Amino acid sequence: MYIKRNKKKLSILKFFMVLLPALMAFSCASSPDVYKDIDFAVGNDDFEEAIAAVVAGQESNKPIYSEKNAIMLFLDKGLLEHYARNYANSSRDLQEAERLIEEAYTKSITANFASYIANDNTKDYPGEDFEDIYLNVFNALNYYNRGNIEGALVEIRKLSMSSGKLDMLARRYDYRDPNTGASLNETVIRETGVNEIPQGKPVNFSNSALARYLAALFYLSTGNTDSARIEFDQLQSAFETNRYIYQHPVPMAVEEAQAVPEGKARLNIISFTGLSPVKVEETIRHYFPFFQHPVLHIANFKMPKLVERPSVISRIEVIVDESHRFDLELLENMGAVIEETFAVRYSNILLKTYIRTILKYVAADIAAMETAKQSGELAGTLVALAAKMALEATESADIRMSRYLPNKAHIGGVNLDPGTYNVTVNFYSGRTIISRIERSNVVVREGDINLIDIVCLK
């Protein structure tokens, strides 16, 4: 790796001076402590209280979710509204989050190079890929629970159709200069003279078993058995082609849902458990041997890192009228999907941080070496140290994300005579029931989807 220090010097300095105000004007994400009231309510499965805590927090002198974090607000509140079974409110919030995510993506693909590599904390939070995917899953369930199957299918098709969100994952980070059409590599070389940069990670997630399962059930309920069969086939394909995500067997409930005996009605249960990983800040060190001043050979990067929030739930039991008992099976490890899709974005964040650091250190290196020539090595070292401290102080990791996505999706079902039933779902930690959810007078109709979705985020 090398840096062209002659012909590039003026253009780099000019570029750095343009970029510096944006680098200095970063704003940190809210401390996790501000969510403690919401977290406490969520931990008790009291989702109405959690929503009230969100509303109260937004009405305070210092709102929990700033204007830059509007997507987080609508995602978190939309999910909590769904868990509280306020489906119309949930749809409204999730749709607004989706609109803002699309708006942010449109801005990103037209941004100039300086805006593209600026610290993410200087910008409005754009949402993560996994948030954009799962908001459609929950909005599909919102539509279903409001009796709108076609609306539910529209939400699922946003994910699964050709050129849908899953299909577009691999293309989201292909930066092109809006003026020249140059690739990121070409732009970096032109602007900095750096001809070796970290390589991005390919996308290894392109199909969601959860989305396919819901689509198949929705199609079955409309009598579209051909489309349902295709979705079940795609579900099987998801397990075969995304083995990093799906390291468990295809649930037996998938096969059973396709073979309901004549005269029987199937009751389907889907349960979301645990809380997804969250981001924290970590510091990583990188070696830059090509700078002249030795003080600038080591740079500290502030990067986001996902950490798990382990669930205590080990088993989910369903009891129907005390005569039918079965356990739910894991369908999708949503936490694994989150980790995989974020790994691609992490590569992009690392690349932008790397380039941004190079640009800052080039100017610092030039200043330090010029000072050393004019005023001695000690003066040059002091300039390098001061510049290094000041430049690293402008960096912080963007740890913003939705805090209330579930970690896992489980499914199960039972074939019954059409009728009305009482359903109890027990969540176990070891041999102890830690949460129980009851649904009374559940009507199970022949030929219908008969789907109940249950949430326990412990």
Image: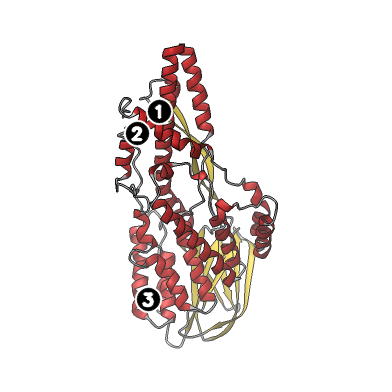
N-terminal of the two: label 2 or label 3? 2
Which of the two discs, 3 and 1, sits closer to the camera?
1
Amino acid type for the residue under numbered disc 2: Thr
Up the image or down, 261 lies above or below 327; here it is below
Is residue 452 left or right of 239 when viewed as pictured?
Answer: right
Label 3, residues with CA under 10 Å away: few <14, some 14-19, many ≥20: many
Spatial CA distance of label 3 from label 1 is 58 Å
Report how far apart the C-alphas of labels 1 and 2 lie in the structure: 9 Å
In front of the other: 158 or 293: 293
Image position of 437 with respect to 429: above or below? below
Q: Residue at x 60, y 66 (%)?
A: 81
The quadrant of the image that shows the N terminus is top left
Residue kind at label 3, given as amino acid type? Ala
- Select label 2 or label 3 by which is in front: 2
Tell me the tag on residue 192. 2
Q: Which mark is residue 336?
A: none
Q: Label 2's element?
A: helix
Visible residue check, residue 391? yes
Q: Which residue is identified by label 3?
A: 228
Q: Tell me if residue 310 can be seen.
A: no
Give the secondary structure at mark 1. Answer: helix
Identified by mark 1, the residue type is Val
Disc 1: which residue:
362
Q: Position of residue 9 (x, y in %)?
A: 35, 27
- Report crowding for label 1: few under 14, some 14 to 19, many 20 or more residues within 10 A (C-alpha): many
User: Is tag 3's residue or tag 1's residue first in the polypeptide sequence?
Assistant: 3
Distance in Å between CA atoms under marks 2 and 3: 53 Å
Which quadrant of the rendered structure holds the C terminus?
bottom right
Question: Residue at coordinates 43% horizontally, 69% vertically from top-left?
Answer: 156
